[in-house]
């Protein structure tokens, strides 16, 4: 059964362009590695600049195997150079009853 994961990234100052490029490469790799379901990932940006990404993985087993995949490890190491990983609950909009975000498409990345 598919699993949805929410990831919150905050690009470091001056690294947003590199971050967006890396985000696109990440999705491409996930697809090449056959890790995602048929549902396209969703991307949004909060007012404070945090990006929220929603991925639907093919299965619980795929999620469990992410840390052992060297291609995924490389992606995550590159992210650590250009952004921080945040708890989604730290995003201010998620404290509101109705959260409003800027929607981003892969064409914008």
Image: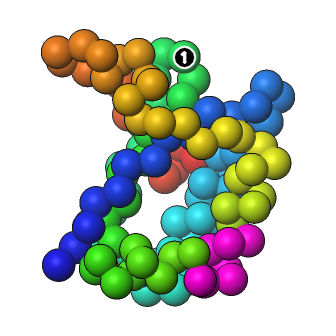
Residue lying at 38% horizontally and 49% vertically, measured from the top left: 6
Which stretch did the figure color magenta?
68-74
Q: Position of residue 95 (x, y in %)?
A: 30, 16
Neighbour class for label 1 at 10 Å: few (<14), some, many (≥20)? Answer: few
Give whichever of 6, 22 is nearer the camera. 6
Q: Position of residue 105 (x, y in %)?
A: 43, 46
The residue labelled by disc 1 is: 48
Residue lying at 40% horizontally and 74% vertically, measured from the top left: 63
- Image quarter hosting the N terminus: bottom left
Give whichever of 66, 53 is nearer the camera. 66
Give whichever of 60, 93 is nearer the camera. 60
Magenta residues: mostly which secondary structure? helix
Q: Position of residue 4 (x, y in %)?
A: 28, 60
Question: Is residue 47 at all visible to an observer of this figure?
Answer: yes
Question: Is residue 38 at all visible to an observer of this figure?
Answer: no
Q: Quadrant of residue 98?
A: top left
Left or right of residue 45: residue 38: left
Left or right of residue 99: residue 54: right
């Amino acid at each position: 059964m598919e699993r949805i994961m929410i990831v919150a990234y905050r690009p470091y100052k001056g690294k947003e362009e590199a971050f967006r490029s890396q985000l696109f490469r990440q999705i491409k790799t996930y697809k090449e590695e056959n890790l995602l379901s048929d549902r396209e990932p969703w991307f949004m940006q909060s007012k404070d600049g945090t990006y929220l990404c929603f991925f639907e993985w093919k299965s619980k087993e795929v999620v469990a195997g992410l840390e052992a995949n060297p291609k995924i490890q490389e992606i995550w190491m590159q992210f650590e150079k250009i952004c921080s990983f945040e708890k989604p609950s730290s995003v201010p909009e998620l404290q509101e009853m109705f959260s409003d975000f800027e929607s981003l498409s892969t064409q914008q990345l």
